[in-house]
Image (spheres, rainbow, N blue to C red):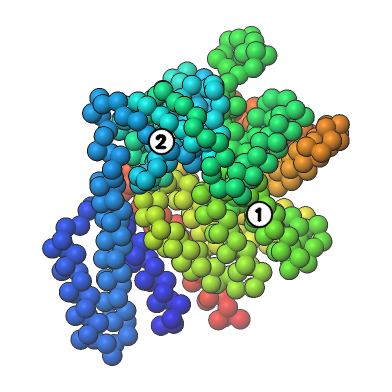
Amino acid sequence: MTSSKIVLYLCFSFIGGIFLNSFLPAGALVKAGLVILGILLISIFWRYKKIAVLGFCILFLVLGVWRHQLAELRIMNNELRKYNDQEKIITLVGLVAKEPDIREKSVKLTVQPENINGKVLVTANRYPEYQYGDKLKIIGKLKTPAEFEESEENKSSSFPFATARDFNYKDYLKKDGIYSVMDFPKTELIEKNQGNFIYAKILDFKEKLRESIYQNLSPPQSSILGAMILGDKSRMSGCSQKEIEAAKQRGEECLKLKEKLNITGVRHITAISGMHITILSIILMQILIGLGFWRGQAFYLTMALLILFIVMIGLPPSAIRAGIMGGLFLLAQYLGRMNISSRAIVFAATLMLVHNPLLLKLDIGFQLSFLAMMGIIYLVPIFQNLLHKVPDFFQLKNIFALTISAQIFTLPILIYNFGYVSAVAPIVNILVVPLLSFVILSGFIFGLAGMIFLPLGQILSWFSWLLLTYLVKIVDFFSQIPPVYFKISWVWLSVSYLILGLFIWRFKEKQKLKFLKY
């Protein structure tokens, strides 16, 4: 047994401990019993390597349980939570810790109070406007986040996607260290520019890029591009007057852009999420190779563009995590060591869970980015083998294999969380995903040009407009085919991945036999 395999087993054991405690919290006696068992296996059977490794795996399982329990204990002992739901008006002074989330009629501010561990999510009026780094005095009542929050856009939604599976808003905030909310408190600006200088400058740049994009493109093209590279999801939550009138003439209710993307299974292209960045980075490298770059040149250029993209969108944690996973995969591909790529991804995921063990259960983006990477690593060779006679014009065969592999491996977790499956998703993804790199690169180019000289940005935006119009037309056409709604339990979720694992194992065994035969 190699040292790299041992590390892999220990990582899986640690992750397994976090997973088990996320659903079945372990008591002190269970942990003590497992620790004793692990120590006995190591001490008695030290000469038998496999049994000794099993003992270490048991200890790492307990370590994962302990790490998750430590995170839960930290939440239970949080100072701010003690004041939740007491109907007592309190005063807090703190910094706006991240970019404000601007909605149609309100804004959500993540405030880090002074000298207190934990954050508060403040829902405030749209005006006056506050920015990252503003020091605020807020006066109001702290509340525990609701288990399920129904936003205004979901209330008016004609698409059952939002309610197909209950969305636990409290857990969603918990993974980000937010355990208290405050609705429409009295706010007072004390001081500006108190945050991290570099991060503040990145957000200033992002705001100028946003202005350039929306000046040079009109909806819905600007809404999609803004969501892709800036994370502006709220602009996809309405229908234009033209769209409403067209829907009325057909005797239908207007479907919002975001609903159409859900129906066609390409919502991920507008989310700055793990799956989006993972697929984007790998496809970008394939396109550069198709353009004639050497593999080494394509690797360095892709890594540089990936880092630039993550910085430009404001360094969100989900993008950083996905960038690390995507970067490790690209590095393994560049070094010609694809056999170690899955181990590197598992090791990276383990380090992320050491930092924040709540991600495993509560962060769907983390789950999707990890599974998308695993799908690309294990299923792409299978599709390449099946399509070996298809001409690989401009790397389109590889891009097709990458897209479908990621979709297949993430499909069960998507159905489990959202309760629906789009029959047209594979077709729409094949038609749309290969263009994402061109859309984002051209968007950045004309956006940057528009920041320097507006007419130049307007000229360069035509290529982006053409690509985005194609995307909109494809989504409009296929969104007329409704998805299928059903739910699966965690049992069927587990069975789905066991079947996928068995299928991959069988394929590898056949490949070994074929190799030995020849």
Q: Is residue 29 visible?
A: yes
Question: Residue 307 at what x, y percent from top left?
Answer: 65, 55
Question: As drawn, which residue projects farthest toward the left?
Answer: 29
Q: CA distance from mark 2 to mark 1?
A: 37 Å
Which quadrant does the C terminus fall into?
A: bottom right
> Where residue 457 sits: x, y (%)?
82, 35
The disc labelled 2 sits on which kind of residue? Val
Residue drawn at 45 percent across, 42 percent down: 414
The mark that comes first in sequence, 2 or 1, is: 2
Question: In front: mark 2 or mark 1?
Answer: 2
Q: Is residue 244 left or right of residue 173?
A: right
Which quadrant holds residue 389?
Answer: bottom right
**Above or below 112: residue 338:** below
- The residue positioned 66% from the left and 36% from the top of the image is 207
How many neighbours does mark 1 have within 10 angstroms: few (below 14), some (14-19), or many (20 or more)? many
Would residue 185 be found to the left or right of residue 317 on screen? left
Q: Relative to 311, is 498 on the left or the right?
A: left
Q: Secondary structure at mark 1?
A: helix
- Name the image quarter holding the N terminus: bottom left
Question: Residue, x 62% and y 41% (percent of image)?
Answer: 203
Please name the amino acid that badge 1 sits on. Leu
Residue matched to label 2: 93
**SS at badge 2:** strand
Query: Do the residues bearing badges 2 and 1 touch, measured as CB atoms within 8 Å?
Result: no
Q: Which residue is mark 1?
A: 306
Residue 267 placement (x, y as % from top left): 56, 37
Q: In this rendering, is residue 331 above or below 141? A: below
Examine the image and state in which quarter residue 380 appears. bottom right
> Looking at the image, which is closer to me, 91 or 362?
91
Up-down relation of residue 292 to residue 486 (above or below): below
Q: Which label sits on residue 462?
A: none
